[in-house]
Amino acid sequence: MLNAHPEFLILGDEAILSQRTRVAIDSAGTMLGFASYKITGDAFELEDLFVDPSFWRRGVATALVDNTIAVAAQRGFAGIWVTGNPHALPFYESAGFHVEGEVHTVFYPAPRLYRATL
């Protein structure tokens, strides 16, 4: 899907300039992945989570989620929301999220998940 729609991997300047984007980089300086978040009203939302497929299953996504959770907790949020890709549901569940419902996205119905920051 991302190969067909690479525009979904383009981060807006605002997310970067406002420091809402976390980046995972290895010791050689290679970018392994990124996560960004947004705050809408009183909700803290994991907006983007992407890891280069050649680095999957090495803890990169978990580290990015954990870092984002820490930011949410530091800012006083009790939890964090994410609309997840259905194929990533096992990852999100293993990262402590639980399904709260389903939303319709541009591509497919997707699980709406929540994780407490505690």
Image: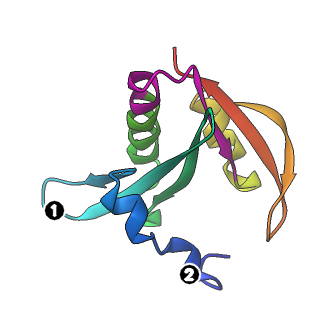
Q: Nearer the viewer, residue 16 or 87?
A: 16
Quickly name the residue at label 1: 29
Q: Name the side, left or right, on which 114 lies relative to 104.
A: left
Answer whether residue 81 is magenta in the image: yes
**Residue at horizontal 71%, vertical 55%?**
85
User: Which sits earlier in the primary sequence, circle 2 or circle 1?
Assistant: 2
Does residue 115 sit above or below 113 in this rendering? Answer: above
Does residue 106 sit above or below 51 in this rendering? Answer: below
Q: Nearer the viewer, residue 95 or 56?
A: 95
Q: In the displayed image of the protein, which residue is found farthest to the left?
A: 28
**Residue at horizontal 80%, vertical 70%?**
107
Residue 45 in sight in this render: yes
Residue 102 on image: x %, y %: 86, 45
Residue 109 on image: x %, y %: 86, 57
Give residue 116's quadrant in the image.
top right
> Which element is circle 2 on?
helix
Residue 15 on image: x %, y %: 42, 60
Total numbered circles? 2
The amino acid sitting under disc 2 is Glu
Q: Name the side, left or right, on which 63 lies relative to 37.
A: left
Magenta part of the chain: 70-84
- Mark 2 or 1, closer to the camera: 2
Q: Nearer the viewer, residue 65 or 42?
A: 42
> Which element is circle 1 on?
loop
Quickly name the residue at label 2: 7
Does residue 62 sit above or below 32 in this rendering? Answer: above
Give residue 99's quadrant in the image.
top right
